[in-house]
Image (cartoon, rainbow, N blue to C red):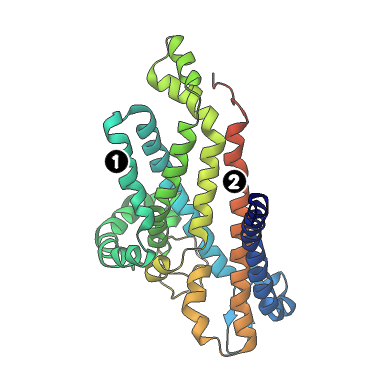
Amino acid sequence: MTSRTADRVFAAGVTALACAVPVTLAGIALLITFDALPSIRAFGPAFLTGTRWDPVHEIFGAGPYLFGTLVTTALAVLLAAPVAVGAALYLTEYAPRAIRSPLAFTIELLAYIPSIVYGLWALFVLVPLFRDEIDPALQRTVGAVPVVGALFGGPIVGTDLFMGGLVLAVMILPILLAVSREVLLAVPPSQREAMLGLGATRWEATSRAVLPYARPGIIGAAVLGVARAFGETMAVTLVVGNSSTQISPSLFTPGYTMASAIANQFTEASGDLYFSALVEIALVLLLVAIVVNALARLLIHSVAGGPQGLAL
């Protein structure tokens, strides 16, 4: 075999491997869509807004599951994003060089811990702590504030939407930190040097030159965190409660997410329509994951498009 023939064979092989990825994704999407068709035809768009989930009478509305997913995901990003960005700023702008890489590596190790371990840790450590100490304190203080207090009303059981969001925040922290750190490292040194040369302090250079440049990438990191939290299953299933389909403003309400609903009920889906309804939930999760990840990639890619200007 000549070298030219070998090159062509190798090129064809890697091309086939590359094409296998989108083909596999398309195959999964088509299979899930086919299995979800009975539910789509039976309920239409009302499937996502309905609040009744009754397998006995074959009436399925995934509104409470979608609500629980949105609440826990939003709470996770709100809790994790400030910590991740602050840690990334410290690692790139303030930390001594000797500890930057070891500290970043240690934090990123959190991403490799299995989700079931997070769930068990939360169930045996965080749930008793929050049920007995932190949740009552939040209810006594923040719960007395008008409007906002509704988030911390109702009975305290420990396994609820609040705990689900907290566990997700810990789980998405490594990816938020890793992406934010890489984005901040991509900021040209001239951005910092120009501000410092004008007499700015370290914080002024960071807040007015570095962060404006890196803002799209940091937002992209947050969107990736949303995608990660949106489909998490085992850890959330252990601590979210899985005992109520009530839509309530209180974070102390036990609930479901879409992923935990599938995990809990898939083996119980005896009827064809019941099975199809659960598969439609999976289809929604898949579509959201694709859209959110594509949006995040576009935002992160925009960091390479040039300086974003100074925040004066």
Residue 202: x percent and y percent? 38, 20
**Three-letter amino acid code at the position of disc 2:** Arg
Question: What residue lies at 61% left-to-right and 76% top-to-bottom?
Answer: 279
Query: As rendered, which of 206 and 307 lies closer to the eye?
Result: 307
- Say if residue 62 shows up in the picture: no
Residue, far front: 1
The residue to which callout 1 is attached is 102
Left or right, 10 with respect to 155, comes to right
Q: Secondary structure at mark 2?
A: helix
Q: Is residue 52 above or below residue 13?
A: below
Element marked by disc 1:
helix
Q: Position of residue 148 (x, y in %)?
A: 45, 50
Q: Which mark identifies residue 151?
A: none
Most foreground residue, 87 or 7: 7
x%, y% of residue 161? 43, 63
Q: Which quadrant would residue 136 be assigned to in this image? A: bottom left
**Residue with the mark numbered 2:** 297
Quick check: 112 above or below 86?
A: below
Q: Quadrant of residue 159?
A: bottom left
Q: Quadrant of the C terminus?
A: top right
